[in-house]
Image (cartoon, rainbow, N blue to C red):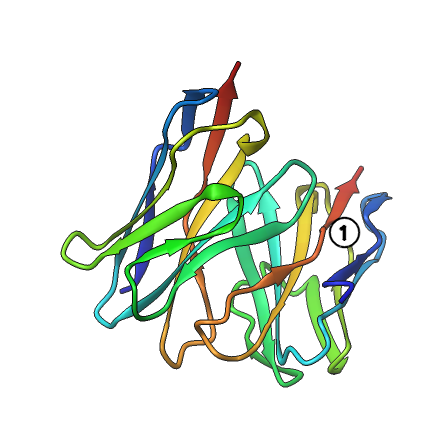
């Protein structure tokens, strides 16, 4: 069965520090992988996605993620956190021919001044 | 593009009343999804449509919930009768049917049942 696991429901970093949000998936077929961000009182917004090709993908607001097939991971990173990055982040996976996207439980990112 | 439009943004109703949530997907998108988000359960898929046809409604919690998509530009989620445990934020999202496309979410409807 396909699934998504986000390690850590809460992550706290200092402003200017590295952001690392972890995501692992389980799949028997090649996945499509996504990260979404949700700011307070808003809907989810697509941050970046991996479909095929280059395994390092760049998204909006300086975020990037790397697809590592051997580790079944798709961790989200940003070199330097900003206060405006405080939000909830969702990892998600879908598959060729599938209609549904499976979302992880979410990781809330706190940024300390 | 105005994005996915949901109405109302907030709804407060009394237990037992009927509630109708509305969604206008992005023009050209042929898949539409209704989600519910709560602190306890996170993001739950309720139902999704492809080309206006319901494909999977296994996430609809009870018979009190129903959803329709009469045309490509409009969908409704109805709760009748409403109960306090239905209080949540309800999101509509649309996409192209291709599974690598990603979703565009609306801003949600915050429902409070008192």
Report x, y in % for residue B99: 45, 74
Tell me where residue B40 appears, x and y as whole percent: 52, 37
Which of the image's four quarters has the N terminus of chain B?
A: bottom right
Q: Which residue is more in the foreground, B51 or A88?
A: A88
Q: Where residue B92 appears, x then y in whole percent?
A: 67, 61
Q: Nearer the viewer, residue B90 or A16?
A: A16
Q: Is residue B77 above or below residue A85?
A: below
Asked whether residue B79 appears in the rendered view, the answer is: no
Q: Is residue A3 above or below residue A80?
A: below
Quadrant (top left/top right/bottom left/bottom right) for the C terminus of chain B: top right
**A72 or A62: which is nearer to us?**
A62
- Which chain does the numbered disc 1 sit on? B
Please identify the quarter of the rendering in which residue A75 is found.
Answer: top left
| Residue displayed at 68% across by 46% down | B89
Residue sitting at x 72%, y 51%: B107
**The residue positioned farthest toward the top in the image shown:** A113
Q: Dot 1: few (<14), some (14–19), or many (≥20) neighbours within 10 Å?
A: many
Horizontal side of A36 relative to B85 (left or right) equals left
Residue placed under numbered mark 1 in the picture: B82
């Amino acid at each position: 069965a396909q699934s998504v696991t986000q390690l850590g429901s809460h992550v706290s970093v200092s402003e200017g520090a590295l952001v690392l949000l972890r995501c692992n998936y389980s799949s028997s077929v090649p996945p499509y992988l996504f990260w979404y961000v949700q700011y307070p009182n808003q809907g989810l917004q697509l941050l970046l996605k991996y479909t095929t090709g280059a395994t390092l993908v760049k998204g909006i607001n300086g975020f990037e993620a790397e697809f590592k097939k051997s580790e079944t991971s798709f961790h989200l990173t940003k070199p330097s956190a900003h206060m405006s990055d405080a939000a909830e982040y969702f990892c998600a996976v879908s598959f060729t021919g599938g209609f549904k996207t499976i979302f992880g439980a979410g990781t809330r990112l706190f940024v300390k001044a | 593009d105005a994005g996915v439009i949901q109405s109302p943004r907030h709804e407060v109703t009394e237990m037992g009343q009927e509630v109708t949530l509305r969604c206008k997907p992005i023009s050209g998108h042929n898949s539409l999804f209704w989600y519910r988000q709560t602190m306890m359960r996170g993001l739950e898929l309720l139902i999704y449509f492809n080309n206006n046809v319901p494909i999977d409604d296994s996430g609809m919690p009870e018979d009190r919930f129903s959803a329709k998509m009469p045309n490509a530009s409009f969908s409704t989620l109805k709760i009748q009768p409403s109960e306090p445990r239905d209080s949540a934020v309800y999101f509509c999202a649309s996409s192209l049917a291709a599974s690598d496309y990603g979703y565009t979410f609306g801003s949600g409807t915050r429902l409070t049942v008192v």
